[in-house]
Image (cartoon, rainbow, N blue to C red):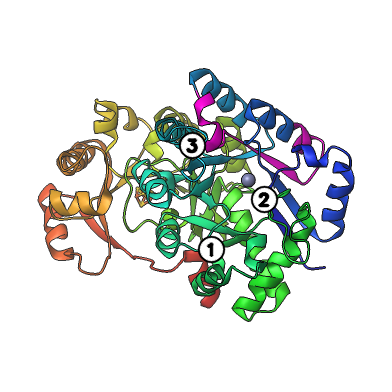
Amino acid sequence: MTKIYDSHAHLNFEGYEQDREEVIHRAFDAGTQFIINIGSGMGMKGNYDAIAIANAHDNIYATVGLHPHEASLFDEQVLQEIGRLADEPKVIAIGEVGLDYHYLHSPKESQIQAFEAFIELARDKRLPLVIHSRDANKESMSILRKMHAGDVAGVIHSYGGDREQAAEAIELGFYLSINGIITFKNAQSLREAVAELPVDRLLIETDCPFLSPVPYRGKRNEPAYTSYVLRAIAEIKHMDEDTLADILLDNAIKAFGVGVEQTIAYPLDNRLYLNITNRCTNVCVFCPKFKNDYYVKDYPLKLFKTEPSYEEIIRALQRLPGYDDVVFVGFGEPTQRLDMLLAVSKWLKEHGTKTVRLDTDGLGNLVYGRDITKELGGSIDAVSVSLNAPDAKTYIKLCNNKFGEASYEAVKEFIKLSKARFKDVTATMVDLPNSDAAATRAVAEMLGVKFRIRPYYKESLRYKKEKE
Ligand code: SF4
Ligand SMILES: [Zn+2]
């Protein structure tokens, strides 16, 4: 059976009171793999109801938030309560949140305030975002960019055909979700826009009970009807429905982390790599994670929901024994979890690991306001520091962090201190087009450390492997 899913349903809305279970059964009978039920839109009650429905069904998940229409209800207490709900096991995203300047049910200022707070919450909880944006695409996108929403990304729900928004959303790592509107007679411009979008950035949804696709237009919508949305996209893309369905399903799994096992430890070339965080100090222009591409070979490194605990990391290490060389790396800066890094490296040394390596951005001292190489010196043997540029201006352009140009000096200082502390210190740079390897190498040499150029992967590391 063709695999469908509904990335945006409101099964907690009143219209389903009489026959909710039947609607859900029809969806799963029709090949639905999972339903994401949106908690926002009914005040706090909607969030509680969405979680209750998710808890009562295996393949239904919930999101929590406050719809922009309700932004005037937003305050510190609401935010705290939604933060608490976000920790519930079936909650997989924050949303729908955003801006709606069409109806202006809440004043713009409250909408913006709530939206920004929810982006921060999503980043804090490491949950993707479900974005509602109506007649406010420019403002929504600029807030998403400003607040580094790409760190968690998510989906622009009910994508309406704004090409500029699509380009920006994709660049930030977001997916665009298509619903029944695509089947409407008067939606020609949306169909044309979708024809140009890459299929690996699209999701499907109903937004039920609203927006029933043709032939149900005007009637109550339900998750089973995503099959009509799928069919419409397949026609536009001249693709076989099943092939498209597999891609769209894979997109949703990547966007929301449903059904993905987290990779904590992974072996590559005789080394064992540890992925303990996705958080970073930098927002590097070359980083694939901002395209929501968290793969290294076949290992998905996106850490959804929670970062691994000490026990989980140790268990992952025990499952893969016998490596002399263990590296802290991943799509995140390991020193963001300094205490964890220290505890795990101590465990590794006690259990006979010959070389414990740390791949770092070298900004730890700036972040913590103290010399962390002292602390690391006890159990780390080798560090590899991303130098990336021959000067401060180039560095900040590539690596982008809140410390500005001063961070380049901090990285150099970190390298110097590391040299005194660790056996093996390497400065690295990513081999970007137009980068000045010779000048960067000269800086590393001046600092008296080794230099290594890391390949720049324009395409996904996973994709690259598949092609090989
Ligand atoms: S430090 Fe690494 S993981 Fe973080 S943004 Fe830069 S390249 Fe990506
Ligand atoms: Zn909705």
Foreground residue among 76 and 367: 76
Q: Is residue 343 magenta?
A: no
**Which region of the structure is painted magenta?**
52-74
**Vertically, is 448 above or below 335?**
below
**Vertically, is 41 above or below 238?**
above
**Front position among marks 2 and 1:** 2
Q: Residues within 10 Å of mark 1 (few under 14, many from 20)?
A: many
The residue that mark 1 highlights is 201
Q: Is residue 69 left or right of residue 285?
A: right
Q: CA distance from mark 2 to mark 3?
A: 49 Å
Q: Is residue 1 visible?
A: yes
Q: CA distance from mark 2 to mark 1?
A: 18 Å
Residue 98 position in % (x across, y down): 49, 41
**Vertically, is 296 above or below 405?**
below
Label 2 element class: loop
Foreground residue among 95 and 345: 95
**Front position among marks 2 and 3:** 2
The residue that mark 3 highlights is 348
Some atom of ligand 1 lies within 8 Å of the CB belonging to the residue at label 1: no
Q: Of the numbered discs in the image, which one, if any, rests on residue 207?
A: 2
Q: Is residue 21 left or right of residue 121?
A: right
Residue found farthest to the top: 77
**Residue occupying image coordinates x 88% and y 43%:** 19
